Amino acid sequence: MSSLPNPPGPQSPAGAAQPLPIETLLRDLAPRVLGVVIRRYGDFADAEDAVQEALVAASSTWPANGTPDNPAGWLVRVASRRMAEKHRSDEARRRREDLAASWSLAAPDPASGRDDTLILMFMCCHPLLSAASAVALTARAVGGLTTREIASAFLVPEATMAQRISRAKATIKASAEPFTLPSAATQTSRLRLVLHALYLMFNEGYATSSGPDLARGDLSGEAIRLARIVHEELPDDAEVSGLLALMLLTEARRSARVGAVGELVPLAEQDRSRWDRALIAEGVGLVTMAMRRGRLGEYQLQAAIAAVHDQAPRHADTAWPEILSLYVALERMTDNPMVTLNRAVATAMVQGPAAGLDVLAIVADRLADHHRFHSVRAHLLELAGALPAAIREFTVAAASTTNLRERDYLTMKAAALAAQ
């Protein structure tokens, strides 16, 4: 199924498109600018640092001075100056002085319109890196996630993730790999890591791990944009189609997931008339075609689950037996404790809350510190009528999450049960 055009941006009263917010513009430009700087200077680690400094400078100066006519060129120019400054301070300063001076005065490349984002994503997934390091670096350099956000997704301390990303950049620098698309022989393994990074980026945008907002539409939107880039290059790859479908089918529910004052609205209580039917139709078409191509993958299965949810007219009409069978297949494929967590919910909806609690016990040791484990257990205990235990679990879950909207929701659930 062909991709639908992106929706038009907000219009001013005169009908002209309004400029993007600076934060959104910077997020959109960051991977492209990084691609230009890497291509020009061939140093991934230094280029990533220089671009980050340029982004910080832009975020502090553009609001006061206005966005430049060529924002990408501005960022490249500032990053180039940072690169020049660094090379002037190296031991080889004298030999590099002329080169550094030419870098700082170089004309911006982005005027050509070239977008090296796909190459950048593949470079971040270098074969010398571990899978975890490659995904983390992609999420950082291309997706713009903070080190803390990535650490939260991997369930590791922030300091550990910072070291992992730093080592990954050093490894790529030492490899001296040219800034080009990988060969067909290595593209498959790298693609798997690229998709995982985009998946993490989308999840962080759809359900923010910390802060006052429930979601970050800029981040989930950027993940979709990057997934579309990969899909345009590899339209016949079933897992690429599956991931894009999953994002679209999930994003379709985003506006209904947030209440009038920003509060969390759970799936069972959402106004389905607010779901984006165009995104649902595109996502269903993508996953249907992908699953007909042959071997199933984890993103196709997750997209299929999302499609079942999205196609149910009401929550009561959800085909839970079908969802349960899909989770069973996904669990066998991934051995992911979060999948088992979701299977517990589906099991409860099909076989009753006691059966769901039995499934949940399988991952109790692996997820004991995660708020989602306690919130799901609280929900199943509530369904089973064990209200005191449910209140305790909702309270533990509220204390464990760092997202204020989720904390409010879980706290209110505990209070509502206590008032019964």
Image: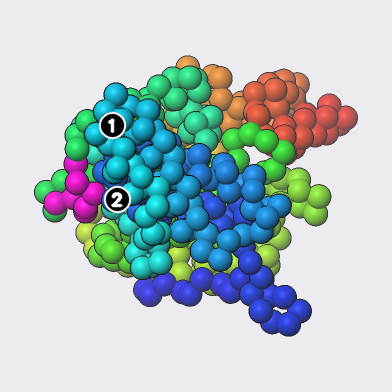
Three-letter code, disc 1: Arg
Location of residue 333 (image quadrant)? top left
Residue found 56% across the figure and 25% down from its top: 370
Q: Name the residue under label 1.
A: 94
Q: In the image as oriented, which residue stretches furthest toward the left?
A: 185
Three-letter code, disc 2: Arg
377 with respect to 111 (left or right): right
- Label 2 sits on a secondary structure element that is helix
Q: Mark 2 points at which residue?
A: 40
269 with respect to 229 (left or right): right
233 with respect to 253 (left or right): left
Where is 150 relative to 230, above or below? above
**107 and 46: which is toward the camera:** 107
61 with respect to 233 (left or right): right
Residue found 48% across the figure and 19% down from its top: 159
Q: Which of marks 2 and 1 is nearer the N terminus?
A: 2
| Magenta segment boundaries in residue numbering | 177-183
